[in-house]
Image: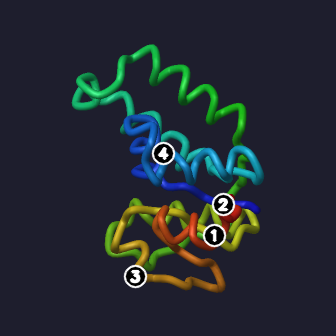
């Protein structure tokens, strides 16, 4: 499975280790490909290293987490510019999904999820992603 995970899911996964976002990130890392574009990865770095996260997770832990994501990532090079999202910064996730030939975006962003499906790309929250793709509990 190839999936684009947006910034809010990736940051939530780092801050809350027993959360649905963390389970979603772990599942994609273990059994799929995590798709980024240069723009989506830069947004993650810019957002995650803001001072407001200092009280949740130490800077060194953030560096290690972002490095792990970088090494696990498959980078796509968008060739199409999308302009459909209310928040223009969300378009980059659609562009990454199209360029990365993936049919799945996992996001906590309601505005982005309102576009589900977009050109055959499912746009779901972490809980719905896990319901669709996690192996059944034994």
Which quadrant does the N terminus fall into? bottom right
Separation of residues labelled 4 and 1 (CA atoms)? 15 Å
| Mark with earlier residue (2, 4) | 2
The local secondary structure at tag 4 comes to helix
- Vertical placement of 119 versus 33: above or below? below
Q: Position of residue 5 (x, y in %)?
A: 55, 55
Q: Look at mark 2 in the image and give the residue it sits on.
A: 3
Q: Are marks 2 and 3 in contact (CB under 8 Å)?
A: no
Separation of residues labelled 1 and 3 (CA atoms)? 14 Å
Q: Are marks 1 and 2 in contact (CB under 8 Å)?
A: yes
Separation of residues labelled 1 and 2 (CA atoms)? 5 Å
Q: Look at mark 3 in the image and give the residue it sits on.
A: 114
Disc assigned to residue 10: 4
Q: Quadrant of residue 29?
A: top right
| Mark with earlier residue (4, 3) | 4
Q: Are marks 1 and 3 in contact (CB under 8 Å)?
A: no
Separation of residues labelled 2 and 3 (CA atoms)? 18 Å
Q: Are marks 2 and 4 in contact (CB under 8 Å)?
A: no
């Amino acid at each position: 499975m190839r999936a684009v995970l947006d910034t809010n899911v990736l940051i939530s996964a780092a801050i809350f280790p027993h959360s649905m976002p963390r389970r979603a990130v772990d599942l994609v890392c273990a059994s799929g490909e995590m798709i980024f574009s240069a723009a989506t990865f830069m947004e993650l770095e810019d957002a995650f290293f803001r001072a407001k996260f200092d009280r949740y997770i130490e800077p060194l832990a953030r560096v290690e987490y972002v490095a792990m994501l970088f090494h696990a990532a498959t980078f796509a090079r968008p060739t199409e510019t999308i302009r459909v999202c209310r928040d223009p910064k969300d378009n980059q996730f659609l562009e990454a999904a199209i360029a990365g030939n993936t049919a799945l975006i996992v996001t906590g962003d309601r505005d982005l999820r309102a576009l589900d499906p977009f050109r055959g790309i499912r746009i779901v929250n972490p809980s719905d992603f896990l319901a669709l793709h996690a192996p059944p509990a034994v």
